[in-house]
Image (tube, rainbow, N blue to C red):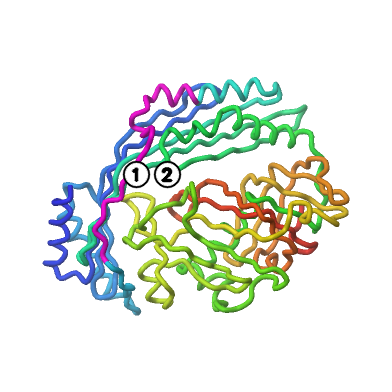
Amino acid sequence: MEEVIRKGIELGEKLNSDYCEIRVENIDLTYISLIDGRIDTLNQRTELGAAIRILKDGAWGFVSCNIEDIEKGVKDAFSLAKNSAKRRKSKIELAEVKPVQENVIKKLEKPPKSVPVSTKIERMIDLYNKFKKYDPRIKAVSISYRDGEGKRYLFTNEGMELIQDVCHVWNYCWVTGKKNQLLTSARDEIGSVSRGFEYFDGESNEEIVRRTGKRVMMQLEGKEVGKGSFECVLGPRVVGVLAHEALGHLSEADLTVNSSFDGKIGEIVATEDIRINMVDDIVPNGFGNYKYDEEGVKAKKVEIIKNSVLNGLLTNREYAKKTEMPLTGSARAEDWRSSPIIRMRNTYFEKGDFEEEELFEGIKHGYYCVDFRGGQAELNSSFQVGIQEGYEIINGEIGDPIKNASISGMAIEALKYITGVGKKLSFENGRCGKGQEAFVSSGGPKMRFKKGAIVFG
């Protein structure tokens, strides 16, 4: 494989490319979906292909192709770059990076390829059966499973020769309950990119059913939420939505220019009463973890908000040069069909020094939002998020569960209403879409907001 890629790089140099990059992906994938106890989809395939990027005269050319077509792909990418350069007003330049020659190995106890598909299906059927036994009001259960295992290659004409083992396992449940005419649902999503099938040894079916079933029942039996703005405490999963969806995308350098963060580097963007810190980083068991990004840049901690000041942006080589910001190793591509773009990894608020009881103390009537179910955000930092687990707060104590709740607001304004940041950090593993799918984690500590920040409805 390496020799085939090197020949492609040599051709790119002969064509006089300013920069030539070839990424090859060779990954075995499994996807299984189970709907109400019956297999709906069973797909096993090998993804083997090449992604070729060439920079010539300040413009990109990108082609994806089969391995046997790399030579043609290089020529086509070069031609695209040359033609694109004639129409570009501004020339693309790349920040310098030290070429890496490394083979990154992952050690797995149970590599997904070594686990029979029958074992994967049995685990899903057992999960379904446990859901059906949990409560007769559970009427529908959809379970999805994915895994992948293989290698990614990155070679460039700058001398980069990087080979990385890749692996992921992922499980998603969508569970629907019914009481009289009321229908409601709850979701559960887990996964790992650092462990193989052994990951599920620590994520038992019993625990998945307990937490998801509980949320369905709460949505059937809980109190209706009040309308308007209230003092509230947001749990790590909901805080993570704000960190990722409502604020994190604003810090991706290719989006910053059209966002509420544009021109605000060095400005105070959060309360000064408590020092607020939000970062994108590699964390233990993070679903967005990797050593090097798709441009061969080592992943680096990005202090997006530091001591309540907007401090940093996520960059790739192009935008690091354009913005004169540091390289952060944030270029990611879904697969060999996709060109790398700036993406988050594990985005979260850092912990503070408030004890648990201090976060709730003094709240006469408010809400505690534990987990979310869907949501959306815009580049002006506006957000709307459905809540699948939440509770009243009455006189500083957690009260009855609530149902049919959603929260909305402007995240960049909500930062100024934070009055407490907890000591314990927690994450949720999930996926992000930005034209391409990427595995990510988000989270933080529990955080308290005064009235005016979050609107309930």
Give the amino acid at mark 2.
Answer: Ser
Residue 326 drawn in magenta: no
Q: Position of residue 135 (x, y in %)?
A: 70, 23
In-front residue for pair 107/124: 107
* Residue 194, disc: 2
- Quick one: 154 or 83, which is closer to the camera? 154
Which residue is at a point 15% across and 55% down the rendered structure image? Answer: 71
Q: Is residue 354 left or right of residue 427?
A: right
Task: Specify start and end residues of the magenta stretch as a single range.
Answer: 99-123
Q: Is residue 413 above or below residue 148?
A: below
Q: 250 above or below 130?
A: below
Circle 2 Cα neighbour tier, 10 Å, few/some/many (<14 / 14–19 / ≥20) = many
**Vertical relation: 386 (above or below) 56:** above
Specify whether residue 118 is painted magenta: yes
Residue at the (70%, 57%) spot, across then down: 447
Considering depth in this image, is 395 or 354 the residue closer to the camera?
A: 354
Q: Which badge, 2 or 1, comes first in the chain's sequence?
A: 1
User: Which residue is depicted at the point 13% across and 62% down?
Assistant: 10
**Circle 2/circle 1 CB separation < 8 Å:** yes
Tag 1: residue type? Answer: Lys
Question: Picture coordinates of residue 365 (x, y %)?
Answer: 86, 52
Residue 328 shows up from this direction:
yes
What kind of element bears circle 1? loop
- Find disc 1 in the rendering and name its residue: 106
Q: Is residue 344 left or right of residue 363?
A: left
Tag 2, which secondary structure? loop
Q: Which disc number belongs to residue 124? A: none
Instruction: Categorize mark 1 by other alpha carbons within 10 Å: few (<14), some (14-19), many (20+).
Output: some
Q: Residue at x 54, y 57 (%)?
A: 347
- Residue 61, picture quadrant: bottom left
Q: CA distance from mark 2 to mark 1?
A: 8 Å
Side of 334 relative to 66 (left or right): right
